[in-house]
Amino acid sequence: MEYNNKKAYFNYFIEKEIEAGIVLVGTEIKSIRKGSISLNDAYIRIKNNEAYIINMFIDKYKEGNQFNHEETRERKLLLHKKEINKLLNHSMKEGYTLVPLKVYIKNDKAKVLIGLGRGKKLYDKRETLKKRAMERDLKRM
């Protein structure tokens, strides 16, 4: 099971990728396994030398009673201090941001693939759309 953030690949040039674990509560892992997750508008922020994923939507688990979770809460990411410092140094450069690229299950644990992205300009996005259209046309022939 893999949930991609297609918007991130469209809006950013991804220069580095790093895998991190996510701290989840009770019913969140069940919702992820069920597929009720969205990475649109999600981003990563580093504060107090800890990484957090913001605005990742995990739908409430239908069978979860009063112990259900908040849908868009801040979730802590599990990274080593070296990795956090490296990401912080790279993201401080002008035009760079940290975005979640994928969420997937690996060895029964939820993981997120973080990308260091440099923002695309409008003409870069148009170029991406043209390439996709040309590839689609070639496949049809």
Image (cartoon, rainbow, N blue to C red):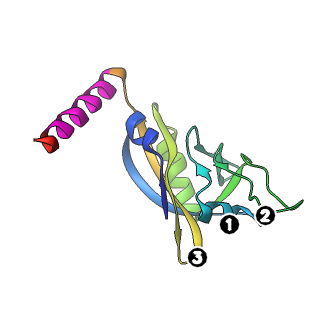
Secondary structure of the residue carrying numbered label 3: loop
The quarter of the displayed image where residue 131 is located: top left
Q: What residue is shown at x 63% (from left), y 47% (from top)?
A: 56
From mark 3 to mark 2, how far is it between C-alphas?
Answer: 20 Å
Taking the image as shown, residue 87 lies to the left or right of residue 124, namely right
Q: Residue furthest left?
A: 141
Q: Is residue 126 above or below residue 84?
A: above
Of residues 42 and 46, the one nearer the viewer is 42
The reply to whether discs 1 and 2 touch (Cβ–Cβ < 8 Å) is yes
The spot of residue 33 in percent (x, y) is 60, 65
Amino acid type, callout 3: Asp
Secondary structure of the residue carrying numbered label 1: helix
Q: Is residue 47 above or below residue 33?
A: above
Q: What residue is shown at x 74% (from left), y 48% (from top)?
A: 73
Q: Which residue is mark 1?
A: 30
Q: Which residue is mark 2?
A: 63
Question: Residue 117: within the magenta?
Answer: no
Indicate which disc, 1 or 2, sits on the residue closer to the N terminus: 1
Task: Kindly identify which numbered label has been placed on residue 108.
Answer: 3
User: Which one is in front in this view, the residue at disc 1 or the one at disc 3?
Assistant: 1
The spot of residue 76 in percent (x, y) is 68, 57
User: Which one is in front in this view, the residue at disc 3 or the one at disc 2?
Assistant: 2
Q: What residue is shown at x 45% (from left), y 49% (from top)?
A: 115
- Can residue 23 be seen in this snapshot? no
Magenta stretch?
123-137
Q: Quadrant of the C terminus?
A: top left
Indicate which disc, 1 or 3, sits on the residue closer to the N terminus: 1
Indicate which disc, 3 or 2, sits on the residue closer to the N terminus: 2
Amino acid type, callout 1: Lys
From mark 1 to mark 2, how far is it between C-alphas?
Answer: 10 Å
